[in-house]
Image (spheres, helix red, strand yellow):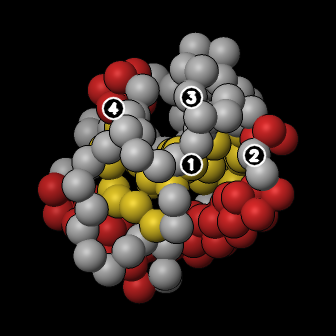
């Protein structure tokens, strides 16, 4: 999508990991949880508004990302949500949950305490694992 811009709040709160198949993959800066965000390149604000082929592609990306979060991060549960109350740009949260996380078993939205940021080595390791899993393009993409 020409002229695609990442919403400023997403850009401020997340690391941009990369791009694949018309979607940007982000990681929340707070490393207490593996909290990914998929941002499809679209002007639509709701998942159900996407054209069927794009919706199917996004769903496949979400399924693959949820499986990655569960195996790579050792998470018991993976929560998915497209809320959009504060950020109108379509984005879908994929949050890995474990019994030892600070919000378990409650929700994470608005309750996750401040935590450390992911370090450069951790981010590069995650990018490499995502590329190996086919979830990011092999070539680095420019930032949206």
Mark 1, Cα crowd under 10 Å, few <14 / some 14-19 / many 20+, is: many
Q: Which residue is mark 2?
A: 50
Mark 4, Cα crowd under 10 Å, few <14 / some 14-19 / many 20+, is: some
Of labels 3 and 1, earlier in sequence is 1
- In front of the other: label 4 or label 3? 3
Q: Which residue is mark 4?
A: 11
Element marked by disc 1: strand
- Mark 4 touching mark 1, by CB under 8 A? no
Q: Residue at x 60, y 21 (%)?
A: 88
Q: Looking at the picture, does residue 127 appear above or below residue 54?
A: below
Label 4 – label 3 distance at C-alpha: 12 Å
Q: From this viewpoint, which residue is outermost toward the bottom?
A: 132
Task: Residue 3 in the image: state x and y as whole percent.
Answer: 37, 39
Residue 143 versus residue 43: which sits nearer the camera? 43
Label 2 – label 3 distance at C-alpha: 13 Å
Q: Looking at the picture, does residue 29 appear above or below residue 9?
A: below
Q: Which residue is mark 3?
A: 89
- In front of the other: label 4 or label 2? 2
Q: Residue at x 59, y 34 (%)?
A: 43
Of labels 4 and 3, earlier in sequence is 4
Label 2 – label 1 distance at C-alpha: 10 Å
């Amino acid at each position: 999508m020409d002229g695609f811009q990442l919403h400023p709040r997403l850009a401020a709160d997340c690391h941009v990991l990369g791009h694949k198949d018309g979607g940007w993959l982000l990681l929340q800066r707070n490393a207490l949880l593996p909290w990914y965000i998929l941002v499809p390149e679209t002007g639509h604000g709701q998942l159900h508004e996407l054209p069927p082929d794009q919706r199917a592609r996004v769903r496949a990306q979400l399924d693959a990302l949820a499986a990655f979060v569960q195996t790579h991060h050792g998470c018991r549960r993976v929560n998915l949500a497209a809320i959009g109350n504060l950020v109108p740009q379509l984005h879908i949260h994929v949050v890995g949950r474990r019994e030892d996380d600070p919000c378990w078993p409650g929700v994470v939205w608005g309750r996750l305490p401040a935590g450390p940021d992911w370090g450069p080595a951790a981010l590069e390791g995650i990018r490499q694992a995502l590329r190996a899993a086919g979830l990011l393009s092999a070539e680095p993409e420019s930032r949206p």
